[in-house]
Image (cartoon, rainbow, N blue to C red):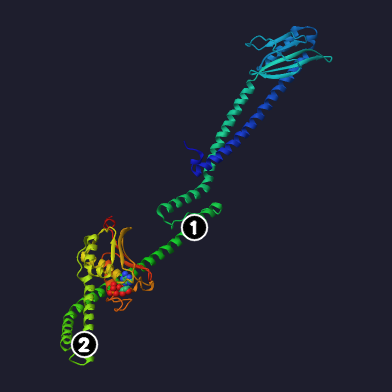
């Protein structure tokens, strides 16, 4: 069922004004009706009272002389009034002395009169009125008249009909007028509602509500429109900023893509150059090396002492150069001669690396332990090289204490995190980035042998497998070389 709050604003306004004007009208009509009926009753009583007093006065002598005929003829004069039902004269002893009843009415019997001498009452559609008959200051009897109230009832009906008619006509007029007048209030509100709906459904802030009046509603509509304009302006500014940003991001992405392409191309060129150069340099270098070694073997002690030293330096330099060229070739092969990635069990990789490091392990009295290691997608040769370089370094860079290395791997999000923990000399945090750059070393060859390419190779291998490598260390407190490698299961999900 619809309640008042469910009604539309127009219906509410109409209901309020029709109800309030209807109520006011009903109250006014009721007051008027009550007043009219009260007055009419008073008039009726007054008229009948006058009649009763006149009859009472005239009935003094019939009563004094017990002349009932005279009393009857006196009462018979009431016949002229069609509303009088009955009348009677009652002696002071309370006996009915003479009575009159309208033709067709029941024979008159004295009604039950109260003790007071004068009065009237409305009783079951009748007005019973009684007055004292006084002679020489002494009440000698009472006269009563019973009248019907038809005239009063007719008046009530007439007034009710008139009031009803006035009510209906007034309500219809109120309805029509309020309908017209309320349109002035409800139309702007409905217009506002329609505009708000359009805005919220279509997100269209260009629509405007029409302000027809200059009252509070007009002000409301104007404020609403102003609000829409502000939102529209802000929207426009936001859209423009977003477009600008998108354009700039696009430009930057394009620039970056071009730069990345350029970088990849120059990297590939560089790699190719390093590979070709180191490969092609090997042959002449091998020739220089074998001839300087031949020179050293054949002419040692046969030239002067300086010559022996010079030949020694030349042999040493050539040998180092060969090692460097070989390292460079290994480094450049990581990208250019890479194999397809397959499932590789790191336990096998570990075993292979350990086998390759047998001599070094024995010479340094090293202990290498490991946790269970996972299967990863990788290039087995490169992974063996990676393990071998990291374990090899951990054994090589030790001080007085015999080297201890522990290899482990843990799941870290979608990756595995490998750790190569040693008890060696450690690395100053300042150099922890630098050591991954090709040919960068922190010690000279007399302290620890090497060319400075091992970690650069490790970095290249890890990155080729989709991970990254870093070291956590402090001088004198051992090192923990870590790298990530995608977890096959994590990558699959
Ligand atoms: P190389 O071993 O030939 O010197 P690397 O690239 O393998 O070259 O290492 C670079 C440098 O990083 C080393 O010279 C050494 O100073 C430092 N380094 C590498 N591994 C360790 C380690 N486990 N403990 C201490 N220092 C290390």
| For residue 408, above or below residue 363 | above
Q: Position of residue 411 (x, y in %)?
A: 31, 58
- Total numbered labels: 2
Q: Check disc 2 and report its element: helix, strand or loop.
A: helix
Instruction: Looking at the picture, tell me which residue is in the foreground, 72 or 246.
Output: 246
| For residue 165, above or below residue 179 | above
Residue 88 falls left or right of residue 20: right
Ligand 1: give its quadrant.
bottom left
Numbered circle sitting on residue 45: none
Q: Position of residue 273 (x, y in %)?
A: 22, 77
Residue 299 falls left or right of residue 486: left
Q: Quadrant of the C terminus?
A: bottom left
Residue 160 falls left or right of residue 318: right
Which numbered disc, 2 or 1, marks the residue that appears first in the sequence?
A: 1
Task: In the displayed orientation, state which residue is furthest to the bottom.
Answer: 304
Which residue is found at the position 63% from the left and 18% from the top?
A: 125
Which residue is found at the position 60% from the left and 34% from the top?
A: 26
Label 2 sits on residue: 311
Q: Are marks 2 and 1 in contact (CB under 8 Å)?
A: no
Kindly tell me whether residue 119 is visible in this rendering.
yes
| For residue 127, above or below residue 320 | above
Kindly tell me whether residue 437 is visible in this rendering.
no
Q: Position of residue 201 (x, y in %)?
A: 41, 52
Q: Position of residue 275 (x, y in %)?
A: 21, 76
Pointer 1: residues within 10 angstroms few (<14), some, or many (20+)?
A: few
Q: Estimate the spatial distance between the alpha carbons at disc 2 and disc 1, rounded to whole Å.
A: 92 Å
Label 1 sits on residue: 227
Instruction: Looking at the picture, tell me which residue is in the foreground, 10 or 487.
Output: 487
- Choose top left, top right, bottom left or bottom right for residue 93: top right
- Choose top left, top right, bottom left or bottom right for residue 342: bottom left
Instruction: Looking at the picture, tell me which residue is in the foreground, 396 or 30.
Output: 396
């Amino acid at each position: 069922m619809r309640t008042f709050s469910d009604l539309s604003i127009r219906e509410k306004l109409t209901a309020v004004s029709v109800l309030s004007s209807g109520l006011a009208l009903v109250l006014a009509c009721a007051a008027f009706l009550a007043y009219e009926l009260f007055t009419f009753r008073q008039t009726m009583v007054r008229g009948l009272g006058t009649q009763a007093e006149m009859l009472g006065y005239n009935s003094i002598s019939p009563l004094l002389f017990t002349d009932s005929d005279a009393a009857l003829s006196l009462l018979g004069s009431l016949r002229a009034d069609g509303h009088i039902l009955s009348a009677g004269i009652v002696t002071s002893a309370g006996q009915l002395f003479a009575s009159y009843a309208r033709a067709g009415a029941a024979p008159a019997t004295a009604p039950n009169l109260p003790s007071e001498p004068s009065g009237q009452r409305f009783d079951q559609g009748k007005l019973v009125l009684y007055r004292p008959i006084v002679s020489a200051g002494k009440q000698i009897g009472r006269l009563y008249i019973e009248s019907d109230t038809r005239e009063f009832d007719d008046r009530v009906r007439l007034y009710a009909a008139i009031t009803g008619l006035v009510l209906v006509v007034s309500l219809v007029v109120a309805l029509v007028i309020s309908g017209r007048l309320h349109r002035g209030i409800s139309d702007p509100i409905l217009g506002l509602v329609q505009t708000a709906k359009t805005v919220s459904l279509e997100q269209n802030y260009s629509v405007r509500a029409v302000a027809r009046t200059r009252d509070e509603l007009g002000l409301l509509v104007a404020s609403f429109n102003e609000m829409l304009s502000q939102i529209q302006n802000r929207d426009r500014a936001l859209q423009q900023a977003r477009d600008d940003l998108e354009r700039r991001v696009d430009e930057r992405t394009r620039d970056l893509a071009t730069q990345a392409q350029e970088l990849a191309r120059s990297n590939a060129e560089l790699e190719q150059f390093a590979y070709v150069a180191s490969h092609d340099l090997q042959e002449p270098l091998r020739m220089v090396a074998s001839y300087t070694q031949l020179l050293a073997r054949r002419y040692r002690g046969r030239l002067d002492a300086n010559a022996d030293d010079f030949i020694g330096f030349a042999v040493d330099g050539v040998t180092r150069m060969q090692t460097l060229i070989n390292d460079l070739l290994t480094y450049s092969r990581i990208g250019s001669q890479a194999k397809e990635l397959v499932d590789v069990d790191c336990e096998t990789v570990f075993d292979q690396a350990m086998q390759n490091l047998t001599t070094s392990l024995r010479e340094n009295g090293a202990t290498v332990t490991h946790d269970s290691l996972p299967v990863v997608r990788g290039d087995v040769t490169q992974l063996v090289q990676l393990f071998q370089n990291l374990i090899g370094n951990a054994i090589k860079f030790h001080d007085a204490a015999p080297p201890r290395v522990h290899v482990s791997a843990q799941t870290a999000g979608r990756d595995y995190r490998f750790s190569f923990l040693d008890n060696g000399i450690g690395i100053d945090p300042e150099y922890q980035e630098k050591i991954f750059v090709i040919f960068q070393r922190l010690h000279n060859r007399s302290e620890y042998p090497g060319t400075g390419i091992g970690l650069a190779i490790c970095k290249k291998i890890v990155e080729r497998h989709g991970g990254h490598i870093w070291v956590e260390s402090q001088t004198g407190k051992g090192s923990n070389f870590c790298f990530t490698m995608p977890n096959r299961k994590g990558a699959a999900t």
